Structures are given as structure tokens and as C-alpha cells.
Amino acid sequence: MTKAPDTALSPAPVSFVQALKFWLWLGCVSFGGPAGQIALMHEELVVRRRWISEKRYLHALHYCMLLPGPEAQQLATYTGWLMHGTRGGIAAGALFVLPSLVLLMVLSWAYTVWGQHPWGQALLWGLKPAVTALVLQAAHRMAKRTLKDRWLWLLAALSLLGTLWGVPFPVIIVGAAAMGFYRARHRHDQPPLTPPPSADTASTHSAAWLDDHSEQGQHTHHSPKRLWRALGMGLGLWALSWGLIAWLFGMGHTLTQMGGFFTQSALLTFGGAYAVLPFVTQAAVVQYGWLTAAQMMDGLALGETTPGPLIMVVAFVGFLGGHSQAVLGHPVLGGVVAACVVTWFTFLPSFVFILAGGPLVESTRHMPSLTGPLQAITAAVIGVILHLAGVFAHHTWWPGGWQTWPDLSAMALTVIAIWALVWKGTGVVRVLSLCVVLGLLRHALL
């Protein structure tokens, strides 16, 4: 007779080296966007390794969902901080990003060398319909979760119209938050951000190393001094790094502009990467001219094929901007430095949010007053994402402009990708692989 495992015993304490190996592994295999990454972390941290309990995991997730920035990377940072303090949080967040940064810099360099080659164009031709389908899938998924009444549908429609009329993205976000806050003050039936786990669900998980009653580490205790110290260090790092770039190269230099702009975008990424991409696209393409709209779409296609946060597509933007303008006198060196600068300023706020706010969040379990504004922001983001899908569809289906005949093959491939993603539930990697194969096959036959 086989002895059943003793689920009452929690696992042994996790060493810092063990955690480092896990975070590096996670950074190398975290495909599938934020939803897939959060699910993977839940499976590994809560179910399989039992490093953290279900309630502690959801508590951290709720906080990360309220923040601007990539929630999966922030969740990894929060969990690393919870386990091993500041060094654990920094290591977890950095290792979650590092593999995708290195891979995207390599892919960006390859794009500048072979991007215009016929076979390279064929590969990108197959990826573009898949990217359009993925953007539409993101809008569909967010709409199903968020648009629960006519008011939210109206807000999404107004956001779409505002984007079409050229209303700046920050104005849309601030306006939606204000409307959501006003509405929340006049109604008391706001649903929670995510449903709490049922008793049955909670009981299926074994005791964890960091469970609901674990002794709190000293680093998790909230104090105003600790909060202001973390905020001061974060602001100091930002001012020192941006000030050094401005002093070395001047206020009008590309690297200085990138540092300022991507700090701003990092503070506005409510709703995930798809929400901020229209903002980044408009600035990078129209305002600064770092790359073209077609190159931006190619970058998103490459970003979808790599692990890590989807917002890492900004590394492609930085590389091409630094490469095209040879910011350090050499295209490749300029591209690498620009990609690193963009990544630094994009993710620095996320580390500050977690390391400064973590102790405060650990002392509170609920934030219901923020649900209304967050719902309104998410509804507005859906409209912005639909506009982005329209822009991508235009470049995919009418590559020569509205006056030309549409690419019917690209239209058909987009429909196939949407069907596979939304109705069949096919994984992102499989859909991307299928579209790439079909793109290469089309080039070989024509």
C-alpha cells in the first residue's frame, strides 16, 4: 500500500540560489503573454513547489493588477521580494526580463541585416496576420472580463472614438479613471478585481513555505521611513541615470529623449502592453521618427515569439532607433545601448512600486475603492486596443495603402489565426509557428 504524501508539512525553506535558478528558468520559458505567465507562476510557485500559498499569491496579484506596468514581471518581483527581501525582488524581476532582452537584441540585429531579404519578408508576412489576431484576442478577452454593463461599453466606444480623433492616450486614461471614480462613489455594487478562491479550491493546495500564517520577515513590515527610503532611492536612481545621459549627450539627444519618454510610458501602462503600444507607436513613429509603422509591427511580431513581458518590444524600438541614428557613432553599438536604456527606464518604476509599496500592501488585504477606476481604465483601454488592431490590420491587409487591392491571403490568414486563438483555444506559440510556416510556404510557391 502506497503511503499518501503528508500535505500538512510545508516544504523546506528556499535558498536564494534555488530561487535564482528558478527565476532564470522562468525568464527563459515564460511564453504566452501575461495570462500565460501568471498561470505558469501559479502552477510552479503555488501548486508544484509550494513556495507561497494561494491567498498570498492572489494578494500579490491583486496589487500588481492595480499598478501600471507589466503585471507578470511585477508579480515575479513581488514574490522574490517576499521570499528574500530587496535582493530577491531585484533578482526575480531582472531575471524575468534579461533573457528576452538579450534575445530581442539579437533578433533586432538580425532584422537590420536580413529583414529585407525575401525569406525574411516571407517570415514577417506570416507573423503580421498572427499579431493582428493576437491584438484582437486581447481586446476580446478584456471585453469579456470587463464590459459587464452598458456604461462600460459606452466608455470603450468613447475611447475608440477619442483615439480616432487624436486625443492623447494619457488624457483618455486620466479621463476614464476620473469617470470610474465618480461612478464608484455613487454605487456600491462594484465586483472584486478577481473572484476569491473558493473553500474547495483553497483546500486542494498543500501547506506552503510562505503560507497565510507564516512569520513575516522584517522586510515586510511597513513603516513610513522604509517607504520614503525606497521611493527616494528609486527617484534618485532615475534622476542620476537620466541626468548622466542628458549631461553626456545633451537634452535633444536620442538617448535622453528615450529615457524621458519611456519613463512616461511606464507610468501609463494600465491594462498591459497592448494598452500602451498605441502610445509608444505614435511617439516612436510620428513624434520622434525612431522607426516606421511597418517596422513597429515587425517588432511586435518578433516580440510575440520571445519569452518574457510583451512590453519588451520596446527593446526593439530602442535598438532600431539607436541603430538608425547611430547614436554612439556605430549602428550596432548604438542599437544595443539604446535597447538597454529603454529597458532600464521602462522597468525601473515597476521595481520601485514593488519594493516601496510591498510592505504597505502586506499590511492591508483589500483595496475595493480602486476597483471602479480600474474597471473604467480597462474599458477605455479596450477601445485603444481596437484602434491598434485597426492600424495593424491596415498595414497587413493593405500594405500598399487604401488605394491598392487588399492582400486577400493576409486577410484569410488573419481569420484563421483569430479562429484558432479565440474559438479553438490554440496556444500562441503554435499559432505563430503555423503562420510562419504558411508565410514561408507561400513565398516558396509564388
Image: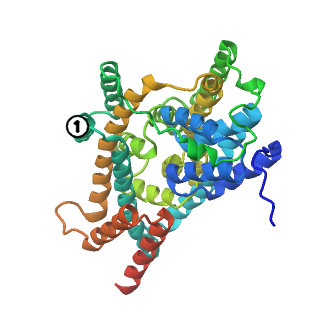
Judged from this view, the residue extending furthest toward the top is 224
Please identify the quadrant where the N terminus is shown.
bottom right
Judge the density around disc 1: few (<14), some (14-19), many (≥20) Cα neighbours within 10 Å.
few
**Is 210 situated above or below 205?**
above
Secondary element at tag 1: helix
- Image height of 189 relative to 8, above or below: above
Which residue is more in the foreground, 395 or 253?
395
Task: Out of 34 and 199, give the one closest to the viewer.
Answer: 199
Q: Position of residue 24 (x, y in %)?
A: 71, 52
Instruction: Name the residue at the left extreme.
Output: 403
Q: In this view of the protein, which residue sits in the foreground, 339 or 86? A: 86
Reading the image, the residue beneath label 1 is 150
Residue 90 lies left or right of residue 322; in this view the side is: right
Left or right, residue 144 beside residue 15: left
The residue shown at (61%, 29%) is 352
Instruction: Please tell me which residue lies in front, 241 or 436.
Output: 436
Residue 122, image x, y percentages = 41, 73
Q: Amino acid at mark 1?
A: Arg
Residue pictured at 43% horizontal, 59% vertical: 298
Q: Visible in this render: residue 317?
A: yes
- On the image, the x and y values in percent for residue 101 come to 61, 51
Colour scheme used in the picture? rainbow
Evaluate whether residue 333 shows in this view: no
Residue at (39, 80) in percent of width and height: 443
Name the residue rendered at 63%, 24% in the picture: 356
Residue 90 spot, x, y in % from top left? 70, 37
